[in-house]
Amino acid sequence: MPPSQNVDFTQVTLSNVSRSYGRRRALSQVNVVLSAGEIIGLLGPNGAGKSTLLGLLSTLAEPSGGQVFYGDLSASQGGAALRAQIGFLSHDLQLYPELTARENLEFFGGLYGLDRVPERATEALARANLSVRADDGVDGFSRGMRQRLALERTLLHAPRLVLLDEPFTGLDEASCTALVSRLTQLRAAGCIVVLATHDLDLVDPLLDRAVFLRLGRLGELGSAGPLRARYRAALAESPPPRGARGQADAARSAPTEPAP
Amino acid sequence: MRRFFQVSWLVVRKDLRVESRNKEMLLTTLFFAVSCVLVFSFGFVRGGEALAGSASGVLWITIAFSGTLALGRAFERERHHDALRGLLLAPAERPAIYVGKLLGVLLLLAFVEALVVIMVAFLFRAPLFQHGWWLLTLLGLGTVGFASVGTLFSAMLLRTRSRAVLLPVLLYPVTIPVLIMGVSGTFALVQPEPDLALARLWASMLCFFDVVFLTLALWTFEPVMTE
């Protein structure tokens, strides 16, 4: 299928999706439907399988069992046309530190076969509030600046499925507000936004729904009450990890009260 | 097809741009290659006379060793900050990314080989430039064969912890025929009476290996890179 052909992104369906790494099962029988115009929070303690799930949705990884459908297409059927509609911001920012901010954007713009790449890069730099540093090497940027640049790289080709792994990491208050506003715009444009995060208070008013992953199993969080309370309830209800190490992990990943 | 080469060119240009700024691969590979030739020259050259046939062996061993060093670093910049995933997620044919990385390695090795050939010709008093075009053909074909397999293995080993150890372990058994053909072809050229027919034979065999290696690498790159 040529990259120019459109893929139906009204729904993305995960059907009995499992993923194993050797003997370790990272995801187990995950079933969920993601619809256009939704911001879905993907919550769960460290090591629950959030990044694995995002990797599967991005088509970079293949499920060990089950299938991911983008409209009627599976990942293997969609190929490059499908990848052209997906934007994935992973925790590692997928930037080249030796290149400047502009060069990074122009490189990825070229890879995506976009038109007006220099103009798009200039606009993206302005949105990231990095116009002044456009021709500076990314290795001299702070984590927050890199995060803003990586977010613009992710959205440069106007994807329909936006996958964000910890997008608020390193951002200051103004940048967080700008990101929230950007995500709202993406929802209004009919994109599917999946947001893996631990910033529960920040995303609470933003999310249309939240799903909860623990030990590779996915469940829906209810809609009544604050997100933090729902998350805690889900954490308390789900089975604890086996072994002393698992319990230590669970204790570490339990949500703490926000600083006053 | 145009898009394929556009993507390859973008990857090469990016690699050259990064290399022009930190010169990490170029300097380490050059330094290693120069050291290699110098050490061999102390071993094989006595009283201004080189051991018969040693020049061709030293030339190709140096290319293999320094090439391995370069190949080990070929995907290193993609490993940092997980940039490889950014590349693989692009709606481009994945073999185009492989071709881009391969061309970057070939350009680097061409630069290193130019210096190594001059050094070997001077230190070993080898008439390497007597049939310069034939030498260029053998070097070109041999380097493509060696680097095409090496680039694929380098990409395959990107996510493994002991990739520095595994790369030569995997690479040398597969590319030994290429190195033997390169040495034999070059040896035929530097004889007191050069045997061009033999050099042509080895060059044809190198060409055959290149086609096989490149085809296999282009075919397997996509499945190899899927997690």
Image: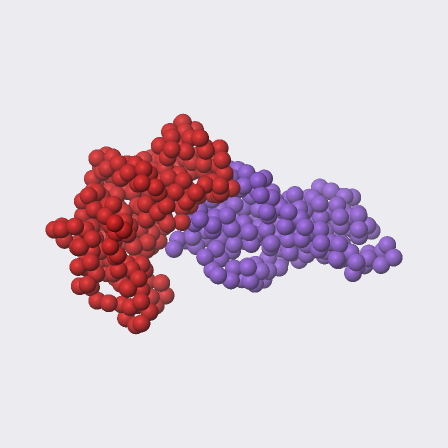
Chain colours: A red, B purple
Identify which residue, A75 or A34, lies in the foreground: A34
Q: Does residue B185 appear in the picture of this structure?
A: no
Tell whether A232 sits left or right of B44.
left
The residue shown at (82%, 57%) is B45
Q: Quadrant of residue A168?
A: top left
Identify which residue, A123 or A22, lies in the foreground: A123
Task: Give the position of the C terminus of chain B as an image quadrant.
Answer: bottom left
Residue B42 spot, x, y in % from top left: 79, 58
The residue shown at (47%, 50%) is B80
The residue shown at (68%, 50%) is B31
Tell whether B75 sits left or right of B61.
left
Residue A115 spot, x, y in % from top left: 39, 29
Residue A58 spot, x, y in % from top left: 32, 48
Residue found at the far right of this picture? B47
Identify which residue, B73 or A167, lies in the foreground: A167
Tell whether A107 sits left or right of A4.
right
Residue found at the far front of this picture? A260
Residue B68 spot, x, y in % from top left: 60, 55
The residue shown at (78%, 56%) is B41
Q: Does residue A108 appear in the picture of this structure?
A: yes
